[in-house]
Amino acid sequence: MLRPTAIKVFSQEDYTLRIIFDNGEEKIFDVKPYIKGNWYGELLFKYQNIEKEMVQ
């Protein structure tokens, strides 16, 4: 069974990522537990990218 590949990612106001996969599936990932620091966490969260099948 092939693993779906993330093709789009959108950061949401509530510090979640909406990830869309090549098979049409959509998932929400809660990033809050992984963000460290007040302003740095906010700045870092606003920039996301998909590279080599990984959300960065």
Image: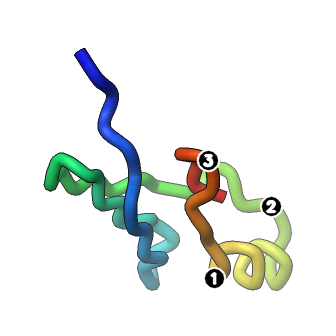
Mark 1 closeness class: few <14, some 14–19, many ≥20 residues within 10 Å: few
Label 2 vs label 1: CA separation? 14 Å
Which residue is drawn at the image coordinates 63% and 56% (left, top)? 51
Give how far across and how far down residue 42 sits, in percent: 71, 81
Give the residue number, with chain letter if any, for mark 3. 52
Give the residue number, with chain letter if any, for mark 1. 46
Quarter of the image for the C terminus: give it: bottom right
Nearest to viewer (mark 2 / mark 3) = 3
Nearest to viewer (mark 2 / mark 1) = 1
Give the residue number, with chain letter if any, for mark 2. 36
Quarter of the image for residue 16 reads: bottom left
Identify the secondary structure beneath mark 3. Answer: loop
Q: How is the image coloured?
A: rainbow
Give how far across and how far down residue 46 sits, in percent: 63, 82
The earlier-in-sequence mark between 2 and 3 is 2
Q: Reply above or below: 34 against 32.
A: above
